[in-house]
Image: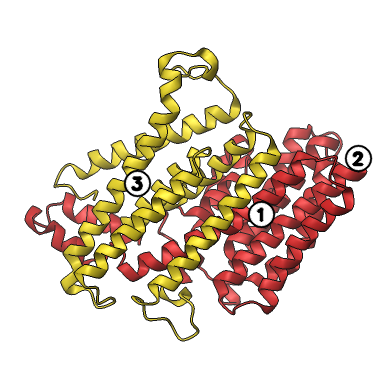
Amino acid sequence: MASTHRELVSLIEQGAIPPDQVTQAVRVAGLHPSPRAWAVFIDRLLLWMGALALTFAVLFLVAYNWVEMGRWLRFGLVQAALVLAVCIVVWGNTSPMLSRVALTAASLLVGVLLGLFGQIYQTGADPWQLFFIWAVLTLPWIWVARFELLWVLWLGLLNLAIGLYFRTWGGPFGVLASSDAAQWGLLGLNSIALVIWECGAQHRGWPGCAGADDAEPSASQLFCFCGQPSAVYGIGSERYGASNERVSAVDADAALAE
Amino acid sequence: MSFTGQGRIKDVQAWGYGLLMGLLVMHGLAYSGQPFWLWFDDSSGSGFAWLAPWLNRALVAVSLASLLSTVFQQHLLIKPHSTHLNLTKVHLTKVHWGVFFGAAVLLLITFYAPGVGQGVVVLLLGFAIGHRLLVGLGVLLLLMGIGRYYYWLDAALLTKSLTLLVIAGLLLLLRWGLRRWLDAFIAQSRDGSLDNDV
């Protein structure tokens, strides 16, 4: 839809559309959503915001570290929320959007549960382990959800895990400075992700290249960009930034292909 | 909305992007705890410090109301060509009031997290003009709004958690009401969901 917007702006700027016919052109281009599209959008927005608010409510409660609330009760609460989200996916209404929202909430709640475990047992686990285990545990759900936003979040978790790992330990290569090692790690991980995605798009029919020249970013792209700090800070940033944009354009296409 | 006339489109877009970037930078600065040249201390007790939070919420409310009014005007304009809905004038008025009521509820329940209101305005604006970048930035603002709410120091996390629980309940109740109410206007898709339509 952004490309239609841009084409229309370009046509108006070039004077191809007379000023008195701009309103009609906008209408014919179908740029503005129909009342039905609005209803669907508001419906989804309320569903997403409600579900995320519920998940964040659980997260805030755990972060409060309420000593009067017994540890079993805290575990029970988070696990009950987790089971509820999974039950919605398994036995709930067959709406794909509802399943995706529930799986997103469930994936976030796994992280809350791991955080609670670390908080109660003082396991001394370094943060990278938390994010890595979180990514490993949620992989099956993300696999079945077939939802590109969740894949981007998952990649973000792995980015965090790798970044924190190298920052903590200085990296397996020893002589490399820790921050450089972290950036090489991130570059490697995201390059592998890009290659896998491109292969999938070429050979397995994953959402792919049609319209990849549309460089207008989307929410997925923003998440993708946020999860990859080395695009901003580091080594090979120009090349890396280009790859990042490519991944993101594919994500945007996946969103459009929905 | 952004097609206000030949030769001015780029200007309007530049202003829009500039203002939005300003908003994002202010959120970012508030996160990092860096001083801002227009920044003031909430506890300074000056008139502006007292006024600013109210001004913030009032501006969000005004922009949301004006966005909704513009969208309604557009739909009155395209009504003769619309094949999706057969709205009569009476129904549309009901829709107007319903949506304004929903927006007012949303603003009230997110009173202490004004970033959420700002995010929703940007998100809706992006959807209204078919601009994906704005939709993405709206989502980002929403998440930043929730993040700032987490770090807001005037309430305990327990209070904030319970408030979020109430907000979640009300949002899902609004959605439930919307679906029941819009059944009268929208033909459902085969599986009873709205998912196949966008």
Mark 2: few/some/many CA within 10 Å (<14, 14-19, 20+): few
Residue A55 image label: 1
Q: Mark 3 points at which residue?
A: B64
Asked if residue B133 lies left or right of residue A168, the reply is left
**Is residue A173 in sight in this rendering?**
yes
Hue used for the chain lettered B = yellow
- Residue A191: give x, y in percent of width and height: 65, 54
Type of amino acid at the residue the image marks with label 3: Leu
Identify the residue at image location x=77%, y=62%: A80
Whether tag 2 and tag 1 are in contact, CB under 8 A, the answer is: no
User: Which type of secondary structure does the marked residue at label 1 adopt?
Assistant: helix
Callout 2: chain:
A
Image quarter where the C terminus of chain B lies is: bottom left
Q: In this view, does B21 lie to the left or right of A106?
A: left
Answer yes or no: are tags 2 and 3 on the same subunit. Answer: no
Mark pair 1, 3: CA separation: 26 Å
Percent coordinates x, y for residue A247 in the rendering: 55, 57
Compared with B58, B84 (above or below) is below
On the image, numbered disc 2 is attached to which residue?
A124
Which amino acid, mark 1?
Answer: Thr
Tag 3 subunit: B
> Up-down: is A13 above or below B21?
below
Rendered colour, chain A: red
